[in-house]
Every structure is written in C-alpha cells, then in structure tokens.
Amino acid sequence: MKGIRNTMTAAILAAALFLTAGCGPGKESESKPPADAGESVVNIPQVISNEEKNRIKKLIHDYFSSLYSVPIEEYGLYTAMGNVPSWIRDFISEKTLELAEGNTEIGIHFPRYFEINGLTVIDYEMKEYKDMEDEMPNIDADFLGKSNDSVYYSVRVEALGKCIPAGAFESQFTQDEHGIYIRIEEPEDGERPAGPEEPEEEEIVEDRIRMLLNYEVELEKIDGIYKLVTVKEANTHSTLKDRLLLFNNDFAQALPYINFDKREGSNEYVNKEDGIVYEREMELVLDFFTGLKSLDRKRMLLMYPCWEKDQLEFSGFLDQTIEMDEEKRFSDLMEITNEYKERFDYDSMPLQIDMLSFSSDKYGKLEIIPCLSYTQNKKKYFVIFETEVMTKDGTIKGVESTCRFNYNVTLSGDAGNEGRLKISGITLNESKKLH
C-alpha cells in the first residue's frame, strides 16, 4: 500500500523493545559494553526472515478477509460476551482462546460501528484490487520486534466502509443492556399504534468510503506455526466501554474513495480502474473552469438577472454565451437543480468584482485533488489554479495580473457514463492576486 504510512504507535514500539530484552548472558542477540562502563546490557532486537514475514502477512490478510466477510451486527453478541466466533478461531492461538471465554477484554477487537466525517460506518470489507503485482496490496504490515516465540506488528488494512448519515443511524439503531448497538425492528402494520398518520420518512441513501484501519498485532509461533495472540485497534482508548462509543474512531483514517496514487517512478496508476475515473473527472473539472473563463465583466453583468430569475434562464444564458466543441451545451456539464443558487453561487464564479476579464485560457498552475471526504456518491475535490487576469487599476483597459483561485468542487454521477457525470456544486474559498 504505497504512499500510505502511519507513524507506529509509541506504546507498542516501547513494549516490543522492552520484551526483546534478553534474560541472561551468552545470547546472540546481546551486545555487551566494556566491563568498566558501569552500564546495563544493551539488547539488539531480534529479526525474522523475509520468508517468515511473507507467511505472517498472508496470515494477517486471510484473517481480516474472514473477519470482514461477516456483517458487523453478527459480532454484537460475541463482543458483549467476550467469545471468539467460529469463522476466525483457526487464526487465533490456543492461549487466547482459553482466556477468551466470557472475557470482554481478550484483545481480539471485532468490527464495530463508528462515525467518521459525518457518516456512520455500518459495515466494512477489504478493498480489492485487480491485476496487481503485489498479491496483498490492501495489507501493510510493519515488523516491530520479536521476543522468543512472539512477534509484534503494526498493521494497516485498506477497507471499504458502507455508511449512512449519522442522524439516520440514530433513528435506526439503539443500544441493548450491554451497550451494543442493535437495529430497531420495524413494527408490522397490525402492531402500529392508532393515531395520526406519520409523514413518510425520507429515503436513506447508503454511501461508501475508503479507509485505512490501524491495528496492533501480536503473534506467537508454536510448533512452527504462527497464530494471532492479540489484534487490537491502534487506539488510545481501546477498552470495550470506549470502543462502544461511536465517535471513538482514532484507529480509522478516511481516504478518498478513489485511489489516485501512481506507481513509484511511473505514470501508471496503482489501481487502473480508479485512474480511469480520476482522469475523466479531472477532464470534466478542467472543461468547466475553462468555459467559465470566457465570462468577462460585461457577460457577468448580463448573467446576473438570468441567475437571479430561475434555473432555466441561468442554464440558457450559459449555453448561449459559452462556446463548446462538438455541439455540446455548457449546461450539460452541470447539475442545475432547484438549489442551483446555493450550489453555484454568483459570487463563486471565477471573475471577481475587481477583475475585468481573463487574458489567457491557459493555467500557470493547476491542481485537482480528491478530498478525504470524497465518497462513492459525493465526489469532492480541491481545485487550485493560477491564471492571467486583467484586473482593475483605474483605467479602462486594466492591468494584467496573475491570480490564484482555490475551490471546493463536488461532482455527481458515474464517470463510466459521460452524460451522467456532472459538476453539482462549487464554492470559492479564495481568489488572490499574486503579482
């Protein structure tokens, strides 16, 4: 998982280094200072072979694949009772299984509900990649240390989370006597209390996010076979009581839903499918802003009454004013709904009140970067560009200046269907004259 690295937890590193300390003289892992130094023995952490590291990574990969293959709600009773479910028992050490019965702090943390970026994750699964040289690109496992038959790892799992709005989760779930979240059962028609008809509930649209889940893992080697001793969320508040808090999400890091990383030293995308989506969405954003640059001060003044009147007049003005290739209409790039005034605020148009026109259709600098809050349904971008602008200076002609623009841009639709992918909103964060 190139480009995705978190700082290893200080506590687990300290623990690993402490545990690697030898118990007596004559060990190969010890380095002795001169006898008159008056200091204690300094220990060199033990290492493991690359072959063993690959075996361990495969074990961790298969464990999380099995763990995430079962819905979160199936883990509620196991979490409350402190038992290990059958579908992951083969991965767990006998020592842990013996301690597990009825122990809610066994150190095996199960999938759970949590909030992130205003959404509540209600399920997750491993992020899968196709045609990758790395057979397990969704697992990043860093070896921390070894003590006798135990090894310690910092693990990051790339996963997809199924989400609903946090408010919708509150209306659909409640906590039982153990504090476990369970889904509220809908009463059957015959069981509904008599009374005035309730308004129809708004349909809850599920969304999906990409995320990085961080774990601290201990394994032990018995008779040549590695098993998991503990798999804990890398979280400063990791007791059961703390993990039942929805806002306790320290172990999770939100990522843009698409992976736009490129292979090291190459222009090829790590994930080809996501790369195709990213290129199409960048092209739409570039076409949109290039079109808006044709609006000079006169056209902006003419556009205002159309923008103020209604969406039909607004889209009609844009189509008549901004030229497009191949008989396309500029408004086809946009999702112009009844909320167009909020989504395409007049003051968010690039040409600001102190500007006369854009003097170039080129960009000195252009960045189109997916936001961390980019989800499957809400494609959010940071767009930053620099370009030449004629700004007011007290003369009719004005003076040419380089200006920088900083936008939040939202897209909707499917990048695989050119006609459906549209700009659904823009917000101007900053316009600044550079020189």
Image (cartoon, rainbow, N blue to C red):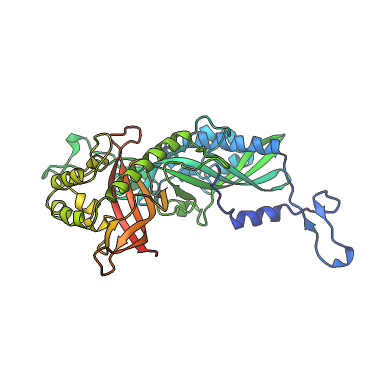
Q: Quadrant for the N terminus, please.
A: top right
Which residue is found at the position 28% from the left and 37% from the top? 325
Q: Is residue 384 above or below residue 90?
A: below
Q: Quadrant for the C terminus, please.
A: bottom left
Left/right of residue 53 with respect to residue 375 in the rendered view: right
Q: Quadrant of residue 416?
A: top left
Can residue 169 be seen?
no
Which residue is found at the position 45% from the left and 52% from the top? 249
| Front residue of this view, candidates 25 and 291 | 291
x then y, percent, for residue 280: 38, 38
| Front residue of this view, candidates 359 and 329 | 359
| Front residue of this view, candidates 288 and 18 | 288
| Front residue of this view, candidates 178 and 24 | 24
x then y, percent, for residue 37: 85, 67
Can residue 410 be seen?
yes
Which residue lies most toward the right here? 35
Q: Is residue 166 above or below residue 187?
A: below
x then y, percent, for residue 169: 32, 46
x then y, percent, for residue 81: 48, 43
